[in-house]
Image: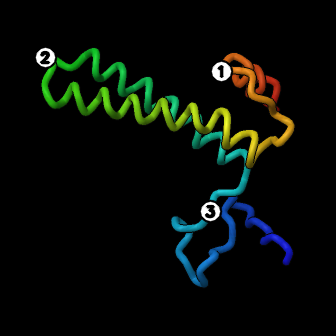
Amino acid sequence: MTPPVPDPAGLAPASSGGAPWWRRDLVHPGWIVAKGCLFLVLGVLAVVLAFLWPGKGWGFAAAYALSVWAFCRFYYFAFYVISRYVDPSYMFAGLIGFGVWLWRRRP
């Protein structure tokens, strides 16, 4: 069986016939990298929000939990998603190595 050809928007054809675009798999490497970088941005913004939150109440806890979740997703993206779906030749070399890989990949 041949793999499905992705459409120009970077989404795989729906595996369950007629699924809407937001339920399709993301397959375009550029969009995958953009999604991973958005996890990093979300984590940084959540940390800033946690430090700026007055007091240590529920708002601080929510911002802290969001930052931990976003950074965990970014870490998973940097090591598993990149080597599995974007660049199989990428080797696990730490976050600095990931930054170098991103810098060299620029157009």
User: Can you give x and y, in whole percent of width and height, for residue 86 in the image?
Assistant: 76, 45
Question: Reading the chain from its start, which is encountered first: label 2 or label 1?
Answer: 2
Q: Residue 25 carries which label?
A: 3
Q: Which mark is residue 72?
A: none
The vertical placement of 67 against 26, above or below, is: above
Q: Which residue is drawn at 62% across and 40% down?
A: 34
Horizontal side of 30 relative to 72 (left or right) equals: right
Query: What's the CA distance linking mark 2 and mark 1?
Result: 32 Å
**What residue sits right under mark 2 in the picture?**
55
The vertical placement of 5 against 35, above or below, is: below
Query: What's the CA distance linking mark 3 and mark 2?
Result: 41 Å
Q: Residue at x 65, y 33 (%)?
A: 78
Element carrying mark 2: loop
**What residue sits right under mark 1 in the picture?**
95
Type of amino acid under label 1: Leu
Residues packed near mark 3 inside 10 Å, few (<14), some (14 to 19) or many (20 plus) = some
Query: What's the CA distance linking mark 1 and mark 3?
Result: 26 Å
Question: Reading the chain from its start, which is encountered first: label 3 or label 2?
Answer: 3
Q: Which residue is drawn at 25% across and 33% down?
A: 62
Q: Quadrant of residue 45?
A: top left
Type of amino acid under label 2: Gly
Element carrying mark 1: helix
Residue nearest the observer in this picture, 105 or 86? 86
Quadrant of the drawing holding the N terminus: bottom right
